[in-house]
Image (cartoon, rainbow, N blue to C red):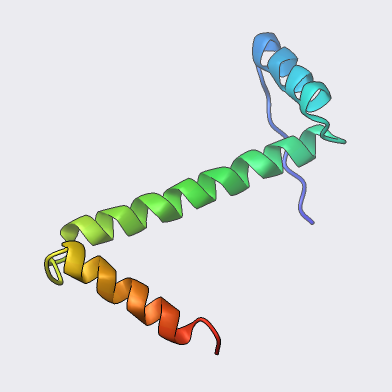
Amino acid sequence: MSTMNISLPEGLKAFVDEQVARRGYGTISEYVRELIRKDQERTRLRNLLLDGAASTPAGVADAAYFEGLRDHVRRHAGK
């Protein structure tokens, strides 16, 4: 595992220390890794949403469409 050193103003350092203690992280590194993972997830989700928004609609999402989805799930639920 690589090491990275960061500098924080005292106010941010105090906030990080408080979050580590309050949320039960063992170390500051665990807290920072979790923040980075969550940011990666948000970035992936944002990109998926943007890709979906830029794509052409596949069809109308009406009651019949959702009933078809439910039927599909029912047929494949036991497999």
Percent of width and height locating residue 69: 32, 73
Percent of width and height locating residue 50: 26, 54
Most foreground residue, 32 or 8: 32
- Residue visible at 60% across and 44% down in the picture: 36
Image height of 2 relative to 22, above or below: below
56 left or right, relative to 19: left
Most foreground residue, 56 or 71: 71
- Residue visible at 42% across and 77% down in the picture: 73
Query: So how many labels did they put on this image?
Result: 0
Q: What quarter of the picture does the C terminus occupy?
A: bottom right
- Residue visible at 12% across and 70% down in the picture: 59
Most foreground residue, 1 or 63: 63
Percent of width and height locating residue 27: 84, 35
Which residue sits furthest right?
A: 26
Residue 32, image quadrant:
top right
20 left or right, relative to 34: right
Image height of 18 relative to 78, above or below: above
Image height of 28 relative to 2, above or below: above
Residue 19, image quadrant:
top right
Residue 44, image quadrant:
bottom left
Which residue sits furthest bottom?
A: 79
Image height of 25 relative to 16, above or below: below
- Residue visible at 73% across and 36% down in the picture: 31
Which residue sits furthest top?
A: 11
Q: What quarter of the picture does the N terminus occupy?
A: bottom right
Percent of width and height locating residue 35: 62, 39
